[in-house]
Amino acid sequence: MLARSDAGALAANLELCRPAEIVEGIVSRLRPKAEGKSVLLSLEGAEDVETMCDHGLLGQAVWNLVDNAIRFTPGGGHVGVTVMRCGDEVVIHVDDSGPGLGAADSDVVFQRFFRGDSARTHDAEIGGTGLGLAIVKAVAEAHGGAADAENREEGGARFTVRFPSLAHSPER
């Protein structure tokens, strides 16, 4: 997927969709993993938000974000997923109550093979290849959007994917 993105050939197969339904399916499939870690996984979504998107690509991006949030959130923590329309965009937030991002990480977290300071997590099982967030960024860009990350004031991190709403979706 990333090689196609580099070559400018990662084309989203755009179809009418409701992003909240895609996100709901991902959250349902990842809920057992969250429960196994004693992490509360919640979803808030605007069911009436429709746009043009590639179901598979968007699903992969959301899976990567929610799976990462669960992995980096300690037991007893919370992962919240929100889908909403904000002006002329569809916005998906994934918030966690994990350790947050390192001081300089928000600028490089979407680069390939980036892995945060493992000393912060104290968890050898977090693992990963460092490609998941690069895929998230590529998918957002294939939809004419963007991805970003920041620390939350109350602790933890927020990862956001935004792309044009139905009225502003890129044409094929």
Image (cartoon, helix red, strand yellow):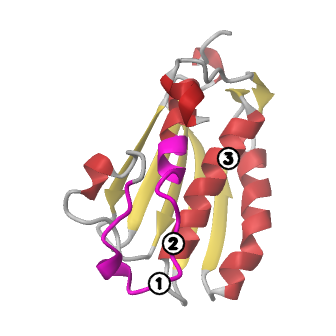
- 19 up-or-down from 5: above or below: below
Q: Is residue 149 magenta?
A: no
Badge 1 crowding class, 10 Å Cα cut-off, few under 14, some 14 to 19, many 20 or more, is few
Q: Closest to the observer: 154 or 74?
A: 74
Residue linked to disc 2: 127
Looking at the image, which residue is at 47% across and 84% down?
124
Q: Magenta span covers which residues?
A: 114-136
Residue linked to disc 1: 124
Report the quarter where the N terminus lies: top right
Sequence-first tag of 2 and 3: 3
Identify the element where label 1 is drawn: loop
| Residues marked 2 and 1 touching at CB (< 8 Å) | yes
> Hey, what amino acid is under mark 3?
Gln
x and y percent of residue 47 in the render?
A: 74, 45
Looking at the image, which residue is at 30% across and 81% down?
119
Identify the element where label 2 is drawn: loop
Residue 3 is left or right of residue 57, and the answer is left
Identify the element where label 3 is drawn: helix
- 99 up-or-down from 28: above or below: below
Cα separation, mark 2 vs mark 3, equals: 18 Å
Residue linked to disc 3: 60
Q: Closest to the observer: 59 or 1?
A: 1
x and y percent of residue 87 in the render?
A: 49, 29
Q: Which one is in front in this view, the residue at disc 2 or the one at disc 3?
A: 2
Q: How many marks?
A: 3
Residue 93 is left or right of residue 103, and the answer is right
